[in-house]
Image (cartoon, rainbow, N blue to C red):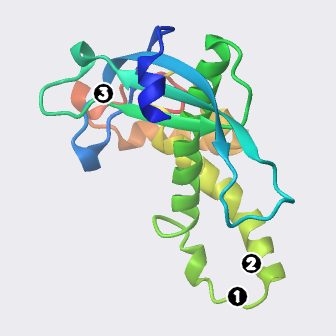
Amino acid sequence: MFEEVSKTDSVVTYTFMVTADLRNKRQPRQAKMSVCYLHTGVQRPANLGKDYPAYLDLCVVEARECSQSVPPGQEPMHWLLLTNIKVANFDMALAIIQWHRWRWLIQQLFRILKSAGLDMENCGLNTIEEIQKLGIMALPAALQVLQLTYSEQSDQIQVSSVMETEKVDFLQYFNPTLEGPTARQKKPHPARSMA
């Protein structure tokens, strides 16, 4: 299946901004991706009963980074995505890829809820109801941390999307007292932007 999708003639290219990842020593870059898709089916395993369909219709979407956009020492990105969503055109294939990219943000949100932030796994609560209530209360805080993490990528996002007006007003009042006299010690971002 994966070999066949690489042989398809229909290919479109698109670009997107790859964010930096310090863990992998990845620098931000503009990545050029070639995309192709293929409709296929997966046969029902022999050990499953006749209650299941004989095969499952799937679509394979492949996104492969073009070599000219890969910096030296970095591996090119290559995604092979299986979906049961009908991909009728390249716009839908690009949507599948975008959904896959958003999955990373969801994983980061759960990471903040668990080991990298709020440590919900070690909360000491015993019942599922208690844990669910804690999760409902912790989710907005984890989302704020995630928004702040990604805030330096854009001066367009307003801090009011994360904090109440009173807190923003306080920060605006208090911030100049934390700045130093030199240009490097002053806040480089616009007032009230998330960055």
Q: Dot 1: what SS?
A: loop
Asked if marks 1 and 2 touch (Cβ < 8 Å), the reply is yes
The answer to whether residue 78 is above or below residue 156 is: below
Q: Position of residue 186 (x, y in %)?
A: 32, 30
Identify the disc placed on residue 28.
Answer: 3
Q: Residue at x 59, y 38 (%)?
A: 82
Q: Amino acid at mark 1?
A: Leu
Q: Position of residue 108 (x, y in %)?
A: 51, 52
- Left or right: residue 26 versus residue 111 is left
Can you tell which quarter of the image residue 15 is in? top left
Q: Residue at x 64, y 57 (%)?
A: 141
Q: Dot 3: what SS?
A: loop
Tell me which numbered mark, 3 or 2, is placed earlier along the sequence.
Answer: 3
Tell me which numbered mark, 3 or 1, is placed earlier along the sequence.
Answer: 3
Mark 2 residue crowding within 10 angstroms, few (<14) / some (14–19) / many (20+): some
Q: Position of residue 100 (x, y in %)?
A: 56, 36
Q: Residue at x 41, y 30 (%)?
A: 3
Identify the disc placed on residue 172.
Answer: none
Which residue is nearer to you in this view: 5 or 164? 5
Mark 1 residue crowding within 10 angstroms, few (<14) / some (14–19) / many (20+): few
Q: Position of residue 2 (x, y in %)?
A: 45, 34
Q: Amino acid at mark 2?
A: Ile
Q: Amino acid at mark 3?
A: Pro
Identify the disc placed on residue 131.
Answer: 2
> Which residue carries the number 1 mark?
125
Can you tell which quarter of the image residue 83 is in? top right
